[in-house]
Image (cartoon, rainbow, N blue to C red):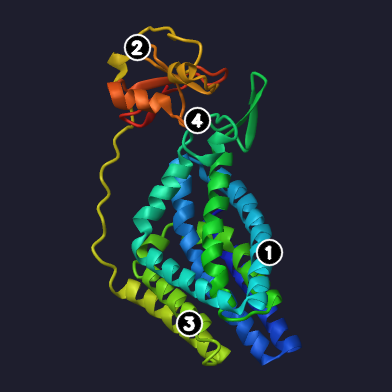
Amino acid sequence: MTTGRAALWSAFWVGLGLGFGGWIFATRGNEAGVAYLTAYLLEMSLSVDNLFVFILIFSLTGIPEHLQRRALFWGIFGAVVMRAVLIVLGVELLERFHWMIYPLAALLVYAAVRMLRGEEQQSRFVEQQCALCESWLARVMPIEPRLHGARFLVRKEGRLMATPLLVALTVIETTDLVFAVDSIPAVLAVTRDPYLVYTSNIFALLGLRSLYFLLAGVVKKLRFLRIGLAVMLLLAAAKLATGGFFHVPPLVSLAAIVLVLSASIVASLLFPGTPKVPAPKLPQACTHRDQIADVAPRTQGCEECLKSGDTWVQLRMCLSCGHVGCCDSSKNKHATAHFKTTGHPVMRSIMPGESWKWCYVDRTMLD
């Protein structure tokens, strides 16, 4: 996906979304058309925050660019299905329980605060989910730490294992669920029509893949964009909470979104700030090879789990002393506990098909 091709696809999807808005104007009237356009622009703006997360996910999981398209395609396909369920649920709740507007408004306020102050927390969450041994996927099935082309699953020695590409896909879906919980209430503040809410979501999502390849290199330079998105969420929260007392015309909502988004982009261009000089990248390598001994497993299972009568099959062996512990996919995480107790840095998987070694200190895999 070249930049030029990404620009053409982005223009196509945006044109399709706006063209659908024109069809809404023609068939359902001005008010519905403005509501759709407002919801679409709001969703497109909030979707930009997804791009920050996509960049982080692919850098942490080491997915090369030619495989990122596959992960994004299935990730966005899953998001389309997920949001349909959430939108139907949200509209139904508001129809049956009018008081639900206040918890939803509070949720938008929380989302705005998180947008302003939670970038580091968001990064930590994504980092934890992308860690091969710490992701929730590792609690369901074993992870093969190396890519196998475009395959999400691979069978090794009779066992079905997930590749890092599947890890990246599951993190995309997980984070989109978080984004959907933020963005859907914001759109419900614009319109309660489920048809307009869903179509505005879908058209915003459809262009997200090409938008990622177009803006991945520049989105981090928009330093005031998160502030603008937070202001949008606060305005949506106020409109949702006070909708029973004050009627805000759809055209006013549209104008407010355009104004806030334009101001945040212009401010980012006028005041770019001091560019951060990236630290020189040093080759990542384990510096504890001298502590690796030729040892055999001391037990056939996790030593601590065997004492308590527990059983766990995903095992790591300490390459300094031969201690065997259960990996971080288990509830006990005795392999990591052994490192914290002894400081022995390098563990090796002793599962069939997983001979890789992991350095806890340098956080890298040995060749």
Which residue has dot 2 on it?
321
Q: Is residue 201 above or below residue 212?
A: below
SS label for mark 2: loop
Q: Is residue 296 above or below residue 271?
A: above
**Residue at position x 63%, y 78% in the image:** 18
Q: CA distance from mark 1 to mark 4?
A: 34 Å
Q: CA distance from mark 2 to mark 1?
A: 53 Å
Amino acid at the residue labelled 2? Cys
Amino acid at the residue labelled 4? Ser
Amino acid at the residue labelled 1? Ala
Label located before the other in sequence (1 or 4)? 1
- Crowding near pointer 2: few (<14 within 10 Å), some, many (20+)? some
User: How many marks on residues?
Assistant: 4
**Which numbered tag is attached to residue 84?**
1
SS label for mark 4: loop
Amino acid at the residue labelled 3? Val
